[in-house]
Amino acid sequence: MLNLSHVRSVLSDCYDLAPSTEVAEATSDIYARMERVVTPPDWAIYAPYVKAINALKKERNAVILGHNYMTPEIFHGVSDYVGDSLQIAMKAQEVDAEVIVQAGVHFMAETTKILCPEKTVLMPDMEAGCSLAESITADGIDEMRAKYPGAPVVTYVNTTAEVKAASDICCTSSNALQIVNAMESDTVIMTPDQFLAQNVANQSHKNVVYWPGSCIVHEQYTAKDLQDFREWNPGTRLIAHPECPPDVVAEADFSGSTSGIIKYVTDEKPQKAMLITECSMASNIADELPEVDFVGPCNMCPYMKKISLEKILWVLHTGENEVLVDPDVGTKARASVQAMIDMSRKLGL
Ligand code: 13P
Ligand code: SF4
């Protein structure tokens, strides 16, 4: 665990990190992407970190891959590439850098290391986990195979390298339905998200059997929440992530991966939209879509929120928190992730 007072004292000796209106003004082009959601005093606090991180990235030949759930100062301020789980995994393979800092959770950094074993992958906080990844081990995959002999195992990328290694193919929320439909067998095992699996089953002709894991952010929403919200705020477009329970997805106007949600709101530009997903999603697109009023409650992912500018600067400065994957496990896990990427490309996803 990081000792934050030590981190602060070392960093403040090496970089000028005091809040600064001058640095804030000098970085106003970056701030313009988040003016609607970050106040000027807050930007004066973030700007010195953003400046230091962006300079250090060049020195270290590093890039930052940011997931759509990062806070705006990370998403817009320091990330070189942003996207959903599939997009950032595919980007990891393309980037020409020695070091990749994963602004996301641990399974994403592991996926990057699996795909790019020759690169140094750094995690700003090793404790940024995921309730789905924690819900299953490789033994769980064996258990499912014993229960449904011969059925292929389609595993969500929100899992450890060992679980990916024990699976046949991975999926993300943006390609799960197409990958399940492409399996030859009539019965398909999906792990570990029961709700993603049920949402896929509702649109597929396959017999989908699943592991009972769930995401602590999306499982909290109920269909009643959506019905009440619609009644109190007529005309609001309700947009849900497929990690939500199926009755929530049924109540929504659209369901898609985080990038699917961004595309839908960008294309449709509804006057009012409620994003039934993690809170930073709406914040990150608010400035690009001034005509959309983002309303309603959202849920915070405590794991994603462990990532901060300070911790990103720390790992770039020290090279600490390198993510390593056992080479044998990595080779098997890469086959599952690569099978997903190849199929996604083939299907034009
Ligand atoms: P996507 O960005 O692939 O939709 O995944 C959402 C998520 O919960 C990642 O942790
Ligand atoms: Fe895991 Fe859910 Fe957080 Fe994504 S939002 S990292 S699925 S707990």
Image: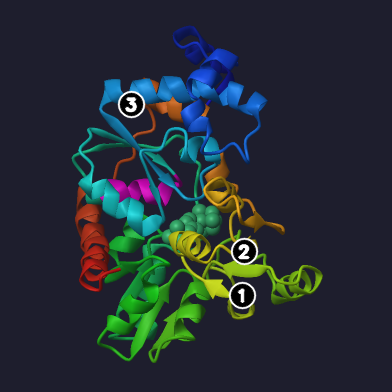
Give the x, y percent position of residue 132. Answer: 50, 61
Q: Residue 276 got which mark?
A: 2
Residue 112 sits inside the magenta stretch = yes
Name the residue: 25% across, 63% down: 341
Q: Earlier in the sequence, mark 2 or mark 3?
A: 3
Q: Which residue is mark 3?
A: 57
Position of residue 260 in the picture relative to residue 86 (left or right): right
Residue 1 shows in this picture: no
Frontmost of labels 1 and 3 is 1
Element carrying mark 3: helix
Q: Which residue is mark 1?
A: 252
Position of residue 118 in the picture relative to residue 4 (left or right): left
Position of residue 4 in the picture relative to residue 77 (left or right): right
Q: Amino acid at mark 2?
A: Ile
Give the x, y percent position of residue 238. Answer: 63, 69
Which stretch is magenta? 104-114
Element carrying mark 1: loop
Distance, label 1 to label 3, CA atoms, is 41 Å
Element carrying mark 2: strand
Give the x, y percent position of residue 69. Answer: 51, 49
- Mark 1 near mark 2, Cβ–Cβ under 8 Å? yes
Query: Is 23 or 212 nearer to us in this picture?
Result: 23
Rendered position, 330 above or below 103? below
Q: Earlier in the sequence, mark 1 or mark 2?
A: 1
Q: Amino acid at mark 1?
A: Ala
Most common SS among magenta residues: helix
Query: Is 149 or 296 nearer to us in this picture?
Result: 296
